[in-house]
Image (cartoon, grey):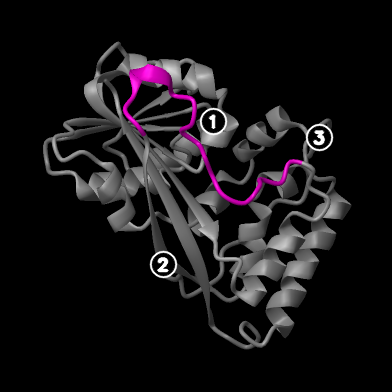
Amino acid sequence: MASSTPPSRPSASTPAGHDPHDHADRAASFDRDADLYAQVRPTYPREAVEWLLPGEARRTLDLAAGTGKLTEVVVDLLPTGTDVVAVDPSAAMLGELAARLPGIATHRGTAESIPLADASVDAVLVGQAWHWFDADAAATEVARVLRPGGTLGVIWNDRDDDVDWVARFREILHRGDRLEPQAGHAPLSGLGDRFTDVEASTFRWVDRLPAGALRVLAGTRSYLLSLPDAERTALLDEVDALEATHPALAGRAEIELPYVTSAYRARRR
């Protein structure tokens, strides 16, 4: 649901030494402006998360949970008495999650070193994060913490670039980005014989943002978070110009941002 007022603007400076073209620096950038991330990043469509979750799940791990965008949908879907635990390397992100979802157990940890016991969860869900992992190490750890028959589910929100203004927004966001993700996802390839074949499904939906929020959303992207101040500001100003001049956006109190959500699942043998 859209807020009636736009969120605050992103903070103004990038920590010294951050390289916008370095994978590790980009991954570490999310410690900044976690509160804005929580405000403007999209949720996940309920039907997609429902498709990922096994009906018999009694304990679910949200891995790389961030501020709890996916966690919140999982909690809403699962029946009372089931357990959800969140793991993320960022204390700032988990702080936001705990403020929004105070009943959820949180742990600092990574996909390559999950701080949970062997065979202790029925499902592991990953929202918008598999590309930050060492896939082989992450698959090994996920297999370790999953009970036999448990589900690994990965979900991605992609803006619908078939819409003209969205394609222009993407061009601004990734201008000069040497790590720009390629179109399409194959995040669960190479799981080996520990998992069943991967199933996939897609879901289309629309997120609604208040006017002025596109700049804030852009400012939560890892590439912009890692840019020098002047370069980031120049790109964010272009986002403002897009919103002010594009016929689908100019003068509107609410922005409808279309997404295509891709979901993938596999079972632990």
The answer to whether any part of residue 217 appears in the image is yes
Single out the mark in the foreground, 2 or 1: 2
* Label 3: which secondary element: loop
Label 1: few (<14), some (14–19) or many (≥20) C-alpha neighbours in 10 Å: many
**Which amino acid type corresponds to the residue marked 3 in the rendered image?**
Asp
Comparing 142 with 100, the one in front is 142
Over which residues does the magenta segment extend? 179-197
* Label 1: which secondary element: loop
Q: Is residue 23 left or right of residue 267?
A: right
Q: Can you identify the residue that label 3 sits on? A: 19
**Which amino acid type corresponds to the residue marked 1 in the rendered image?**
Ser
**Which amino acid type corresponds to the residue marked 2 in the rendered image?**
Trp
* Label 2: which secondary element: strand
Marks 2 and 3, Cα distance to the nearest angstrom?
Answer: 34 Å
Give the mark, 2 or 1, whose residue is nearer the N terminus: 1
Give the mark, 3 or 1, whose residue is nearer the N terminus: 3
Q: Can you identify the residue that label 1 sits on? A: 90
For residue 44, above or below residue 160:
above
Residue at horizontal 56 percent and vertical 53 percent from the top: 36
* Numbered circle sitting on residue 10: none
Residue at horizontal 35 percent and vertical 18 percent from the top: 194
For residue 189, above or below residue 249:
above
